Image (cartoon, grey):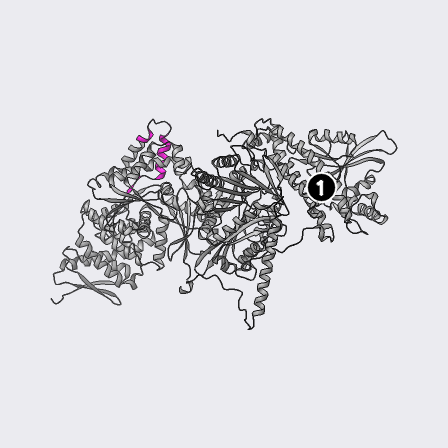
Amino acid sequence: MSKFDKQSYYKNRELSWLEFNERVLEEARDSENPLLERANFLGITQSNVDEFFMVRVASLNKMYSVNIKTTDASGMTPKEQIDKINEKEQEMVTRRYTTYNRSLIPQLEKSNIKIIAPSETTEEQYKFIQRYFNDELYPVLTPLADDSSRPFPFISNNSLNIAVRLHETDNKKNRRFATVRIPDVFARIIRLPHEDNTFMLLEDIIKEFIGSLFIGYKVSDASTYRVIRDMDLDVAEEDTSDLLREVQRQLKKREHGGVMRLEIENSMHNRLKTRLIETLDVDKKAVYEVNGPVDLTFLKKLPNLVEGHPELRYSKFRSFVEPSLSNNKNFFTAIRKKDLFMHHPYDSFDSVVNFIGQAATDPNVLAIKMTLYRVSGKSPIINYLGLAAQHGKQVTVLVEVKARFDEENNVRWAKQLEKMGCHVIYGLVGLKTHCKIALVIRHDDDGIRRYIHLGTGNYNDVTANFYTDMGIITANNDIGTDASNLFNMLSGYSEPPYFHKLHISPKRIRTFIDKKIDDEILAAKSGHKAVIKMKMNSLSDQKIIEHLYKASEAGVKIQLIVRGICCLKTEIPGVSDNIEVHSIVGRFLEHSRIYYFYNEGNEDVYLSSADMMTRNLNRRVELLFPALDDNIRHKIISIFGTMWDDNVKTRMLHGDIFTHIDRRGHTRLNAQEHFIKEAERKNQLLLDQQRAEKRNTSTFIPMTHHDGSARLPGSDKEE
Amino acid sequence: MVKKLYGIIYMTPRQLKLSIVDLNDFSIVEDVTSNFYSNHTYEYQHNVQAITMALNGFLLILKEYSVKNYRFWGNQQSLDDISARYLGEQIYVRTTLKVHWLNTSQLTYYKAAAIITHLDNFKKISSSLTFLLSLGSERVSLSQFSNHKFTSTWNIDLGSAQLYDVNVALKPNMNNPIAVLDDYIGSKLEHLKHVFANQTMPSNLILQDALIINKKFIPYDQTSYTMPLEEFNNLYRKVTDASDQFLMDYFEVDENVITSVTSYFLLLHKIVKLTKPRNIILTDITVSDGLAIERAQRIGLRKQNFDELILTTAENMATRYLTSKSHRKNVTLIAMHLFDQLKKLHHLGQRERLLLQVSCILADIGNYINQQGHYNHSAYILQSTKVLGLSDTENLIIAEIARYHSSESPSSSDTHFKNLDPDVQMKVAKLSSFLRIADALDDSREEKIRKISVSLRETELIIFAYSNQNIALEQWSFSNKAELFEKVFGLKAILKQRRQSQ
């Protein structure tokens, strides 16, 4: 094999992920961030790690359970990885709760935002929680006894439970265990009356009155716990070796849903603890005793519940809407003039929604086709697609029902879309459709035209507010043909002999990236300038990393911005001297994927829905598309430059450790803030312009129609 | 300008293709191909499910472009009429699409029409001798053009289905399967050897429907690629020596397809040896393009007329069977005059006019076998040598016209005639009544009557024959043969001679 194949050259992807979560935790600890946002960050680290255990640790456990000894790129067996993960996560848990107890809670209290215990209530508040318990909670609570006559009840994944230790009131010797599930139909945080921004956690209310569930017994201990189970998701799609598919077959016979992690309050009585560990059959290393409330995800909800306190939040900003894409203009005319580029959330996602909206009602539009991976709760896009179908357009939607944790949601949307008259394709067998593309077929004056939106992120109007993504809307003919071909392929027709401009995985993105890297290597070897810049969420594909090492060795300068997992190591002499890796974790979740190649001065720029991960390159339908318009290309290069120069939210990779950049002597640059300011400046400029125009209007100009339809120069000549 | 979008669905035993074409300029708006129904069988009957799925998807795509004009054709080469009818019904109830089956001669015709219209430089290329080799699922056809004109076509009984079967049969247990395959293909080409024995002229070979080779060589913004003979020979050597894996890599195809590549190259190489071209022109122009042209013609967007292809084939066939050129010319002239003047009477269209014309040319070819009962010989020759561009029904019509153009005439007591489809019966009766009159007017083969005019009266049709010679023989013949006309149209035909002043 190649000389870059050494285990020491690769970082284990799970540990790299845990370190990413650590960077998110740093944001929760960073006093420069507004307090409520820090609480939110802390909540995010919790939900991140929960998902991580349900999926990643679960796959490792599966491999371990059938005794697989094969190692990953860094040379670790599944068991070694699981142990290392638990070791690391134990540290993280400690830090997470220290942050919660020592930093966030006290500082929130200073701002009069309190999460209190029943003992800290006023008399009226106590009466409130008692009533709440009796009227609302009591009827739905089901205590389940744990004794020799019945099996231990099934504790479902991710549910909060209270373990109870009790004895008969008259007979202290007769000890019993019981467990009570905290119903998830109620909000976790209850707002208390008679005082602003004072809250209580649901489990604290239940614990306070839990005695009333056990008449004739006395409760001596009640503590919260939670289990994370193997969710038995489609592991084959996961970014691990093909081995796992083999494993999956063997596992068919086995019982699923083993416990991956058990969290308990550290105040739990030893007897209870032992009993839980024993009955849940969980490895001691995977037992987490936490110093505070179990499951901190409620912190994500807190900022919305708190009233007032704008000073504790990120300042709001208005995203920029390109004037030609505002709702009262004819998009299609604008798009035919030039390609349009958007950088969300700085550029408003409304433009994309409006694009679909206009297509839905435009009399000349014949058909709309799009892919949906994750959509928001009340998605305007879904409504527009329905509207389009009602207007007699042919609407074809590919809903990926395998989108993790959104499966149910997506099936529901898909059904609704079908009801509204859309043609729905439910993904492909064995492949997740991850590409983000919308195609509008329109009957223009001069014939059939295709308008295409290509994006790096999902068509989700909610996440678009805090994910950074890029998109291009174009009427380019070649891309249009490619888009049609892509949708035909997704509808089950054969692959066209070639695509013009788009590169589509499985298969072609990897080949294409490989070729582009090879070109740079060749340039570097001939003594020419050779540069590769990439921005992605995760970099874990061993082959690609190997190729980047090879490029580095050849002298290609490589700049990578990787938000999450990075299995590549820098500063290995003779291997990765020419590679620099940055990671930006900040207010917005960095989500855009940019691939740049110097290519002898041509500076080719591509955007993509794909990360350089094995699953994206081998087992998903992904899209890589070029920025053809020179202005757009330069714009993206300059955006990458700004991100690269960020020295506030950027961490730099040294070896396999990310550390903050030493800012001394440099002016502070927070790229995300910079882009916000730029959007605000553009908004102001636009406003000034409009005002100026209004002032200058001295004659009456009647508005007859909102805009002309798309016309080509010379199109008037035709009949 | 309103787009004249037209949908063409074409079905072969392997896959289905939908092309949406703008008939104004033949630009392709959308091209969709189904996956192979199956890798193991070339039979429609086993793949109705896959066909149905693909077709229903095509209907959706047609809606997306709001295309209301579309038509569905099927390649009938591998099916007999009854199976084709069954299959057509099965597809109809599942998709509401009615299939129009195309036989080999129609396929060759549409492919040739497409090449003539669309191939860059076809004019220039065909100024020298040009061959067109079309690969099909059941049959390969080789056509010849010289001086821009279509001259002849030969069918070779070697389709991808056969080659696939032979290949599968040979592969595992032969120690030199390629040599055996080579011999097999050679045997199928035996009948062409004498045709091309003296072929020494510089020529070009256009290769049509060689999908795998096309994909490799035709640049994506072009429709053709010209390969000099030398490059072809190198490629031939490379391919015949290569391993399957090399071929899979080289042509970017999967293993299910690879078996046919070698056999195609063996075939090609043999054809090249026969025709001796300087260049091999690969093109991805297909039968669908020909179907689009036909449609454009039909709705008047296209003036170009490919009837000439059909007439040329007929002429060449007549010459091959040694019929008298001047006689068939004279008969054609008179029959066409009758047809054109009597439109009010027969209500037939341009296509039937063409059929009559073809019948005039070919009616006498049976003389080659035997003068006695020559009309019957003509009929069976025509049934077994289908005329280029005609559907099976059309071919049947001309064969029947030939049968009834001479002494036998269709009558209600004739069992053969009774068994014809009513629609065919009527056309045969009308058209052969014209041919019979025309034939009678040149019974002596002396071309005594070169011009006629007709006058349609209440109860009779008077035909004025312009001639200064004695036409007693023609008169006598006419009185025998015009009877059918009276039966069919209810008008008595009367021949009157008119002498022209010198």
Q: Quadrant of the C terminus of chain A?
A: bottom left
Q: Where residue B450 appears, x then y in whole percent?
A: 17, 60
Given residues B425 and B314, the one toward you in this image is B314
* Residue in the foreground of this view, choosing between A596 and B30: A596
Residue at far right of view: A170
Say what amino acid the circle numbered 1 marks. Leu
Q: Position of residue A51 (x, y in %)?
A: 64, 39
**B169 falls in the magenta region:** yes
- Residue density around tag 1, few if under 14, some if 14–19, many if 20 or more, within 10 Å: some
The front one of A37 and A614 is A37
Residue A445 sits in which quadrant?
Answer: bottom left
Q: Is A355 positioned to the left or the right of B361 in the image?
A: right
Q: Is residue A29 above or below residue B122?
A: above
At x 52% / y 48%, what residue is drawn? A637
Direction from residue A248 to residue A304 in the image, left or right: right
User: Which residues, given as a range, are shown in magenta?
Assistant: B155-179
Mark 1, secondary structure of its residue = loop
Q: Is residue B8 above or below residue B278?
A: below
Q: Is residue A361 magenta?
A: no
Q: Specify the subunit that label 1 lies on.
A: A
Q: Which residue is mark 1?
A: A296
Q: Position of residue A504 (x, y in %)?
A: 48, 43
- Any part of residue A375 in sight: no
Any part of residue B273 in sight? yes
Number of numbered tags placed on the structure image: 1
Q: Is residue A218 left or right of residue B127?
A: right
Q: Position of residue B100 (x, y in %)?
A: 38, 50
Give B485 or A607, whichever is nearer the viewer: A607
Residue B40, picture quadrant: top left
Left or right of B288 on screen, residue A443 = right
